[in-house]
Image (cartoon, rainbow, N blue to C red):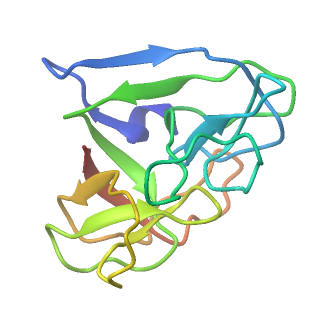
Amino acid sequence: MATEILVNDGGAPARIMNLGVGNAAIDAGTFVDIASTGKIVAAGTGYADAEQGSTGQTVALGVLLTDAAANAATSIITGKGVICNVIAGEALSTIGTEVTINEAGLVEATDDADNHRAVGITLAASVTTATKSDGSAIPHMVKVLLV
């Protein structure tokens, strides 16, 4: 799936880094954070030490480039102005939708007037044809510009 997550890295201030090992299996395209143990977790999973913005929404390190396994190295895309395919927690059909992170590190629309921190803007409608490296289907992938 790695070739399907990062859409454009030319000129954008982005980096792909190994910032720790996975706490558990996490799908590529999920927004991730780091726990006090130094392990990578899906952002928004409720770790007490998760960094939070002024609105209380978890702040993500970036997007997982490849599937992560427990105690194995991770590759994380960080930066702003980067275009990535990410996993959405719901169907997103409108281009230009501001998205935030849900409790599983997946994106969802911020149009519910909750003060969540926006992490991206959709550049296309979500698709349902993506598959994980194990061949199982991903319900919704969407192209976003990271902000």
Q: Can residue 64 be seen in this view?
A: no
Residue 7 spot, x, y in % from top left: 27, 37
Residue 102 shown left or right of residue 107 in the figure: right
> Residue at 79% of width from left, 43% of height from top?
25
> Residue at 40% of width from left, 80% of height from top?
91
Q: Is residue 31 above or below residue 128?
A: above
Depth check: 119 or 77 in front? Answer: 119
Residue 144 spot, x, y in % from top left: 27, 52
> Residue at 57% of width from left, 22% of height from top?
75
Residue 1 shown left or right of residue 77 in the figure: right
> Residue at 54% of width from left, 47% of height from top?
52
Depth check: 129 or 42 in front? Answer: 42
Q: Is residue 139 visible?
A: yes
Residue 62 spot, x, y in % from top left: 47, 35
Which quadrant of the rendered structure holds the C terminus?
top left
Residue 5 shown left or right of residue 144 in the figure: right
Residue 78 spot, x, y in % from top left: 40, 26
